[in-house]
Amino acid sequence: MKVSLNWLRDLVDVDVSVAELANKFNTHSAEVDEFYQLVEATNLVVGYVTEKVAHPNADKLSVCQVDIGTGVTQIVCGAPNVDKGQKVIVSLPGAVLPGGFKIKKSTIRDVESNGMICSLSELGIDKKYHNEEGIHVLNEDAKVGANPVVEMCLNDEVLSLDLTPNRADLLSMMGVAYDTAAILDKTVHLNEYKVEESNHKNEAKIEIETDNCFSYYARIIEDIEIKPSPVWMQARLIAAGMRPISNVVDITNYVMLETGQPLHAFDFDLVETGKIVVRMAHDKETLETLDGKIRTLSTSDIVITNGERSVALGGVMGGLETEIVSTSKRVLLESAVFSPTHIRKTSSRLDLRSEASMRFERKVDPKRTVYALEMATYLFTKYASGRAQKGIQFVDNITDEVKTINLSLEKINRTLGSDYSLQKVSSVLTRLSFDYTVENDVYVITVPSRRQDIETYQDIIEEIIRIIGYDTLSPTLPTTISLGKLSESQQLKRIVKDTLTSLGLSEAITYSLVSAEKVFDFTKEETKLVRLSMPMSMDKNVLSKTPLNGIVDSVKYNVARKNKDVFFFEIGKRHDEDKETLLLAGALCGEISNTLWQGKKEVVDFYSVKGILSTLFVKLGLSHLEFVSMSDYKNLHPGQSAYITDRTGVVGFIGKLHPEYEKQNDLKDVFVFELDLEKILELRRPLKKAKDINKFPTISRDLALVVDQSVSAKKLEDVIRKTGKRMLENITVFDLYQGENLGENKKSLTIRLEFSDSSRTLEMTEVDTRTKEILVTLEKELQAVLRY
């Protein structure tokens, strides 16, 4: 919400600077995104073009003689629309325009130029707020020599508020005025509008055929004249972030911005039947809206009809058929209240969000419906030369219930931990313009209709303390009998994050929403999807089954931008219909390290990722987990993938992306992993206690074993560890050899065995005996033989 300070000062006495007001809003009301001068240009004057001749040395330039009030000066201008007799904006030498552009006396193609004739864009007014090509021509009543910024009412400051969805009241200048008055301890002064009516009775007929239109008020205004709106109104609309169009459109927008009540103007002659019927749309009914698009409607949409066909999409956008045009003479002015739920559904489904729909979605003040209608009617009669027909036609189904909340002073102080007096709290409620009575220190507070967000006593307490100031509360520690500590799950996640980041990975946070076409890219089975009922886009219409979808997309994003060394992990969730499962996932690619001057480079491969996970498992007390080769995932390389298991089953997987998948996604050598953290939490074993360093020597034996290609190093390790018993301290596989001299389908693995005993020095004969036992067992179980 962009707030014009000039407009705000019409409604409440603001006696502080915009910077100070912004600071107070940040403390007591809504967050201020920014505040700024609407026009920051300096040294500008209103000029009158007394003469225009062609430039002698340039076809597209003109030499103008301009009266600036203190004399006539010569200015070279390139705008095609400059002409004699115009009042224009002149920036004199020494002027500074937005962007730091300084105006100097200059010579252009041998002709002296003493300044510049400006367009609105050159003053910093965005092109979206005006349709002008070339310079801006001022109204005839502009005073020569005066400040054109003042003449155009653009001498304003703007406060840009970042509103939360509950503060719909701040979507109007009146709402901002009430909050400003409460903060500054001032009084809001609203205008009263008395409409002069003709003797011609209001001929509109109103019918409501749906419970989703709570009220509908209408006036008929005749003999309107379509023309530009007054300069002051255009300036306020620009400050509020809206483009002035015509007096009719500008008045409805102006009233909406001031009151928060959206209005719509129909060309009453194009309504044809003289009747307005509000109903729900028929299924597949179509309507061409003001933006020229044909909308296909559903039964959840509210439509305004003439009793025969739809002429507007209630609360969202008008229809093109009844649009106000330059020849319109009779206007039906609508002020209504619609169901917020249905407006939100319609605007979301049609992707058609407007200023009106935003306000209806967040609830409007039903007591401003007539006030807004009368204000707009008054402005139509004044600035569009209209005549209001006698009376208002309406149907109002809103029950005039008053919402009251009982709240004791004791409860206020107990909730806030404060010691406020009755007088202080009463003063705050008065500043907020809340009606109340108090008896025996208990308030009966009447919630104003403009504050649709206030439902409970907690809301009232929040209002009281935000006006007093949260910073005035004394900081205290909560009283509790429990000791704060991390849960096991929190501890696990912290260890995972600390370990992986220490190993060079970066934590990513990706969308949990993906497209239905990609959701099963990294799952073994296709389970039932959790779909969004109203997705923002079809690219994100279901909840993910693994964080890998988002991580791989992040890798693609980085690789496409030449960042090819990517090491991501994420703690996310698998979303099933009845539960969510906590997962750890990651993706790595590129170089781990390089020393090119030595000709060495280490890139990510299966074993480097396995090493990272093995280090993590040691930290978590999961060193018993094993890697078992597999080829069950469609988008993983069948020869470089493995399950991560223990005796209870699978807890995750690791693997390289399938070459075909990498080709389709412009990736290369990407390795991924996924772990079920909930299973891992159950499988953790207590970390072993520290033990003394072995004081006795270690004896090692290197064995080069020839085995079948199908025999994995893991199988060899298992057999050796089982036979070596406690004497065998460590096993290391450090070489693989494959060659024709070994025989068909054979390979050689070289393994180092380290023997030791913590209580004594081993004899060489003991080690040799145990080594022979290992060799015999290996030959018996795996047909492994020594290679000589």
Image (tube, helix red, strand yellow):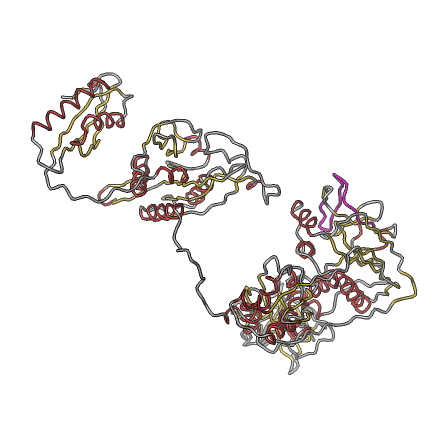
- Write down the quadrant of residue 723 in the picture: top left
Q: Position of residue 547 (x, y in %)?
A: 45, 41
For this orientation, the residue located farthest to the right is 199
In this view, the residue farthest toward the bottom is 70
- Quadrant where the C terminus is found in the figure: top left
578 drawn magenta: no
Judge whether 132 appears above or below 634 on screen. Answer: below
The quadrant holding residue 73 is: bottom right
Left or right relative to 609: residue 395 = right
- Report the side of 188 relative to 205 (left or right): left
Residue occupying the point 79% across, 62% down: 226
Asked whether residue 282 is drawn in magenta, I would say: yes
Res 340 seen here: yes
Give 308 or 713, whichever is nearer the viewer. Answer: 713
Q: What stretch is highlighted in magenta?
A: 277-293
Q: Is residue 244 visible?
A: no
- Please tell me which residue lies in front, 305 or 241: 305
Image quadrant containing the N terminus: bottom right
User: Does residue 466 lie above or below 757 as drawn?
Assistant: below
Q: In this view, does 570 lie above or below 102?
A: above
Q: Position of residue 670 (x, y in %)?
A: 38, 37
